[in-house]
Structures are given as structure tokens and as C-alpha cells.
Amino acid sequence: MPEHSVKTLLIGLDGATYDILDPLVAEGHMPNLKRIMVGGCRAILRSTMHPLTPPAWATLMTGRTPGNHGIFDFIKVDRKAGKPTYTLATSADLKVPTIWQIASEAGQRVTSLNYPTMFPVKPVDGVVIPGYVPWSYLGRAIYPKAAFKMLKEKGVFKAREMSTDWQHERKAVQGLAENDLQDWVQFHITRENRWQEILMTLMDEEPAELTSVLFDGVDRIQHLCYHLIDPETRDDYDTEASRKASDLALSYYRDVDRYIGEMIEKAGPEARVLIVSDHGFTRSGKRIFYANTWLEGLGLLQWKPDVPMDDQGRVALDENTEASTLIDWDATKAYSLSSSSNAIFIRVASEDDPGGVAPEEYETFRDKLTVQLKALRDPETGRAVVKDVFTREQAFPGTEMAGAPDLTLQLADYSFLSVLRADAPIKDRKIPYATHHPDGIIIGYGPGMRAGEEVAPMFIADVAPTVLYSMGLEIPRSMEGKLAQGLFAPETLEATPPAYTADKTGAGAGKQETLSADAEAQIRERLKALGYL
Amino acid sequence: MAITIETAEAALRSIFEDLAEDLEADVVEFDRDTKLLDLGMESISLIYLISELQQHFELGDRLFQHLRESDRLLKDMDMGDILSGLVAVSAEEPSDA
């Protein structure tokens, strides 16, 4: 086997924010991160327009925006028939090649652990263990099969401890009782330890030039424990259960910091390191917007008989039941299907489905709904509920735009809407909760990178071309992201200027339409207007 | 390539044999009347199973599309629905070819 040494180490921390990391570094919980921040270069990494895990990571992994890579949510919605249905988004829905496919095709070995929308794995030279896979399928999901057998023989593969239990996750992200928080944090401490053991094993047994891992417990723990982690608020919660959960959550960050140190040491001094998050985090407001209940009030949605009212501050059903089963489709013209998408779909009439909005009235209908959403005020506080509303042309321009929701909402407090039925469209949240914020992190460290500087904010699509450049590879011209030149020392850029290449379609991306030059130009203008470019 | 009930069934049996080996468990036995819910898998794993079949037979996402047209949830389907779905989809011209 030829020698392989790590050129680039890509460490994903789902939902990481400087608002939490900086205080934890200052308090001494994360000495390795401190060393990297001092010896490296950092910037805010602006997420996708809707800062959600699957579309944001897919953008980071491909250098393309959701309108072009095709991932908009955890789910893929099919609304060809009158009644929409959905399934989990998979790699079949990701229409463009990932950095692992591109690097592999360029002759580099890759390791990719725990990234979303990677199953079924598209073949590469290296090892891929997709994220978000249930335990019973995780072993089979590993590519190649020999890697699974090796990891099992080494005793580091323990599917139940490192997989995703969707039902558990859906229930937990709605909020847990104070006494259950410790179990939630401990679950992720164990889980990250498994992924770290696997990564360390692969770095020994199957070394790869591009070595990548995603720790997603940061996001899961922050959703429920942000108030117990943030030094500004953690002392306000002084019950024994809160203090224990807080201590455990802090120990989680110390573990992650230790893993970062171990990975960098094993990668060696020649490796460049990028630590990135898909979005940032912030505290949610105290109110929940029940979008479908609001649409019912406008006469645009009808519930099926006997759909119960939510009185627990939930945003979705606990079990894996589709929200579409709650809605009377004979009398519904607009609806929200998932909390995570923060989106409203409009049912457009067709020959097969005459019940929707007439196509010629679509624009007017959508404009009116936008105006009504922007005018919506919380009756208790008088404040706007919705900060902004984006049409799909604004939010997701590109070849895959037809799969995007009609309207995507940015709520005033960045929180997620509820798809459930309630007795009022805006109600109190029952427990402290935190939510996604557009400002994530990027930290670069290693040979040829700037040291001790904070540079201008970057866009999440910039990570893919930056990873390829850091490995000495050509950057496909189709990537909407740009090389993050600010992370590299000027002499590095001068000595090794970036090289660009035409798209390679053989990277297993599947069908990929191309845009005309005019359409590309329009998309770039749109992204500029949104502050992405 | 047209898929027959036999090739579809063989592909499924091969997946279940692999899964059993991975999990060090007994191979799941099925026939065309076996409910998907009775396969002992989480509902999300069923989605991954179908994704894998689509990739194996190079069907894009056409098997999912076909199954959605029946207006039934995955949990209410049986293995016969999957097998006949594979056969039906492979007989169609892909719309995005």
C-alpha cells in the first residue's frame, strides 16, 4: 500500500459558535482550541440562507448552494400528487459531487465520518461512514465493507452507541425534563468517543490525505443545554439536576477539545487543519409560532377531524409520523410539513389535483402570504414574529430549485416553527431552548496559513474550494464558493496560486443539469444580494 | 436492464444476509406477503433499504416515486409491494434520461 499522510484534516463541529467556544476557551476548558486559535486564523462562517444541518453541510461538502445541490431539509418532499409525501433525504438527492469524490478522483485517499446525506455511499478511494444512519443499518452503510470488518475486529465499531435513533432525537430536540438532560449529554459523550476511536483507528490503518469527521453532539447538546453552558446564564440554574447537567455538558466540550488535540497530533505537523461548523447557535425566544394553525386561521388549511391540540410546546410529532397525516387535503391550499425547514408550501392546482391555487394566481397568492407573514405580530408582545420571508427564487436559485419550498421563513428569534395544531398561532415555549443562528465558525491552522488573525466573514460554500486548495488540488469552476484566501498567508498564495478546472462529471454525482451563463450570473447576483458572495 | 421478481428477491435476500452477518443475528426470512414492519427494522432503516435498492439497480429515486403513488405509508406495505415496484420501475423509461 502506498504511503498516505494527512494533507488536510477537516473537523466538523455541528452548530459550533464563538459565543460558546470563546468563553469556554477563556475558562480553560478547551486548551487545544486555544492553541489553534492563537496559532491559526479564524472567521465567522455564514451558513446557508436557512441555517439547517443537511442543506448547510451539503453546501460545505460541495461548494454549491442548496438550489444546485438539491438538499433543502432532512426530508425530500414530493408534491406531484395532491397530497404531499416525503422521505428522508439521501445521497441520491445530492446532485453534485462532494469534496471526497473530487479529491478521490484526483488520486487522493479520503476518510469521511458522520456527515449527513452520504448514504448510500458513492464509491471513493478511502473510507466513508455516513451520518444519520440507524444502528441496524450502520454496519452495512460503511464503505468499503472491508473497513467495517476491520473496525469490528478492532472492537471500535459499536453501532448502538454511535448511530442515530431518529425517534429518540425527535423527542429530545423538542425538550427534555431537567432530570433527563444528563442522560442526553452522556449519550453524546459516549457517541463522540466512539467516532473518535474509529477516526484514530482509521488514521492508523487506512490513512488518508483528506481526513474528515463530524461531531454532531455540539448541536444536540446546545439545543437543550445552551443555558447551562453559557457562562452568562449557567449560574441562574441552581437545582442539583441543572448543575450536574451543566458539569456534564462542560465535560463534553473538554472531550471534544481533547479529540481535536489527538487528531492534530496524529495528523502531523504538515497537515492543514480546518475546524468548521454548519451554523451557529443562539437562545430561542419564549414563544412558538404554530404555522399550520396560523394558516388554518386564514382559511388556507384544514385539519383532519379529531387532530389534538398541542399543549406541550412541541414543534412536531414525537413519533416518526408524517405531519401530512394530520391535514385534510381536500380543503388545504398552504401548509408546513416539517419544523426544521421553517417553510410553507403552496398547493398549486393541476389537471390531477384541481384543489390547489390556480397557476395563474400563484404569484399573487404567494405575495399576499408573504405580506401577511411579515405583518404578523405576537399579540402578547406586539413584536414581529417573522423577521423575513424568502421565495424559493430568492433563497434557492439553481437547477434543483423546483424541489424547494415556496416560502422559507426566518423567524424573529431564529427558532423553528411548529407544524402542530394549537388553540392559538403563537404560544409559550415550555422549557429553555436554543436554536440555529446563521453565523458559524471556521478556524484554519497549519503550514502556510495565517496565524493569530481574525479575518472577514466567509460563506459556507467557500469551505469546499478551500479544502481542495489546501490539498493542492484544482477547484472546479462550477463551485459557487470561493477559495477563502484570507485563511492563507500571502506568500502561500503567491507560491501556490489556486488552479481551476472544468467540472468533472464522472465523480458519481448522478444527473447534473448545467446552467446557462445568464442563469449563473443571475444566481451570483442573487447570492451577492443576500450577502453570501 | 429489466428487473424480474426473481432478481429483485435475490437482491433483497443478499442485503438481509449481509445485515444478519453485520449484526450477528439470524437472517430475516420473508415472502411477498411479509409486512415491512415485520422485518424488525426501524422505519428509517426501511428508507435506507429502498435507497440501497435504487442505487443497486441504478434507478435514481424512481422506486420511492413509484411507492408514493400508491398513497400508502411505507409501514403499511409488504415485500410484494417492493418487489413488484422494482419490476414496474425498471420497465418504465426513466423520465430524466
Image: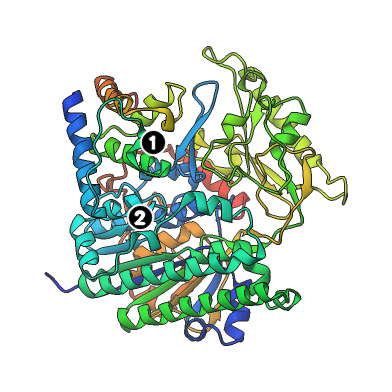
Q: Secondary structure at mark 1?
A: helix
* Residue A15 in view: no
Indicate the position of residue A325 as horizontal and vertical percent values.
Answer: 57, 30
Chain of the residue under label 2:
A
The disc at residue B37 is 1
Q: Which residue is mark 2?
A: A130
Q: Is residue B29 above or below residue A60?
A: above
The quadrant the N terminus of chain A occupies is bottom left
Q: Nearer the viewer, mark 2 or mark 1?
A: 1
Please give left or right for residue B62 compared with residue A191 in the image: left
Count the labels in the image.
Answer: 2
Q: Amino acid at mark 2?
A: Pro
Please give left or right for residue B1 compared with residue A6 in the image: left
* Residue A53 in view: yes
Q: Secondary structure at mark 2?
A: loop
Q: Residue at x 59, y 36 (%)?
A: A337
Chain of the residue under label 1:
B
Q: Residue at x 48, y 63 (%)?
A: A216
B84 or B34, nearer to the observer: B34
Quarter of the image for residue A497 reads bottom left
